[in-house]
Amino acid sequence: QNRTQKSQSPPPKTPTTMVPGMAPKPAPPMPAQPKKPQHMLVLGTGFVGRYVSERLLSQGWRVSGTCTSAAKKMELELLGMTASVLDATTSNIADLHALQDATHLLISIPPIPGVGDPLLSSHADLQTTLTSGNLQWLCYLSSTMNPKSASSKLRYAAEQGWLDLVDELDLSAFILRLGGIYGPGRSALDTIAKRKSSSRRQKLRESKQYTARIHVADIYQAILASMSIKSTRKIYNVVDDDPAPRSEVFAFAQSLIEKRYPDLAADSAESNSQSRIIAAEKRVSNGRLKQELGVRLAHPSYRSGLQSILDSWLEGNQ
Ligand SMILES: NC(=O)c1ccc[n+]([C@@H]2O[C@H](COP(=O)([O-])OP(=O)(O)OC[C@H]3O[C@@H](n4cnc5c(N)ncnc54)[C@H](OP(=O)(O)O)[C@@H]3O)[C@@H](O)[C@H]2O)c1
């Protein structure tokens, strides 16, 4: 029987250092490779991009981002980011060094009237760079749309452009259609506190009776949730449960401020004067955000969202 075994498996090679009668020393374990941190690149580190970046940095991510001015670049660097100044209308995005290394890419630069998505003019170079890079996940921040408006057509074309670009790449890709974004530093409360009179653009928006909104914390949640599923072409509405006219949101913000800061509120009643009633629009469903991405909104209504912003003022952690 021994002979048979021998003929089936040759004897193991004896290490030259082996001492007769002693078992060979096992090879020392390889030192554990430190895990390379995930690397997020944010194209357009504005309100949402910055919120997301700050949180990912605190989770140990490496985060790079672009902006359009040297002053903003310095601000981003102070947060711990690797920042670059990029004007997408004049620079080739494919030259951006971080693009080759990034594992995650968040696109937050809006399309430009008459130009379209400024990043997609470098489509071919961009695709080549991404193919040879480390990218696993891409997310384009879009907006809820009324398909007839010119700006929505631009948005839709940008969405399609990004989906075409990722078509041949093996990565997860998401389009998040965001409602009106608010959060600490950008809200009806901030407008009232700064006693800004509404700009003409804001006044025009008052004519839309119902507008879908979303707190930036819930955008962050949706982004994180999308990272945990593998998907190629998924589009989600990212809005809260409570679309409301701008006048209603301002009236609520005003009442919150009146309770806490009576002096501040006295001067700012203008924001509450809108009374035009025009057909409802910009109400979209967030069903798939909840069911497929499993997001439980931190702020299902602007009421809790604004309340939390006011609370953060009092806590001094704005
Ligand atoms: N605001 C809303 O209520 C709302 C609603 C739905 C969707 N969205 C869209 O969602 C995305 C994120 O929103 P947000 O409020 O975070 O946007 P944001 O604060 O306006 O940030 C936009 C970013 O894009 C950069 N950018 C603009 N034009 C550029 C150009 N030509 N080249 C290079 N960079 C350029 C800006 O650079 P700087 O930082 O240097 O200014 C900024 O970092 C945007 O696409 C926005 O249009 C916004």
Image (tube, rainbow, N blue to C red):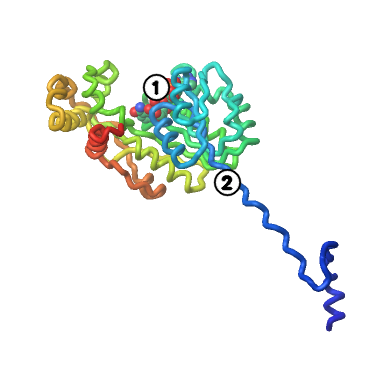
x 44%, y 24%: residue:
75
x 61%, y 24%: residue:
95
* Residue 302 seen in the figure: no
The label number, if any, that marks residue 35 in the structure image? 2
Mark 2 belongs to which amino acid?
Answer: Lys
The label number, if any, that marks residue 106 in the structure image? none
The residue to which callout 1 is attached is 150
Q: In which quarter of the image is the C terminus?
A: top left
Report whether 291 appears left or right of 276.
right
Residue 303 spot, x, y in % from top left:
22, 37
Q: Locate ligand 1 by image quadrant.
A: top left
Report helix, strand or loop for mark 2.
loop
Report whether 237 appears left or right of 7.
left
Q: How many marks?
A: 2
Q: In which quarter of the image is the N terminus?
A: bottom right
Along the line of sight, the residue nearer the viewer: 236 or 132? 132
Along the line of sight, the residue nearer the viewer: 109 or 244? 109
Residue 153 spot, x, y in % from top left:
42, 26
Q: Distance between the residues labelled 1 and 2?
A: 46 Å
x 55%, y 33%: residue:
164
Residue 70 spot, x, y in % from top left:
48, 17
* Residue 247 seen in the figure: yes
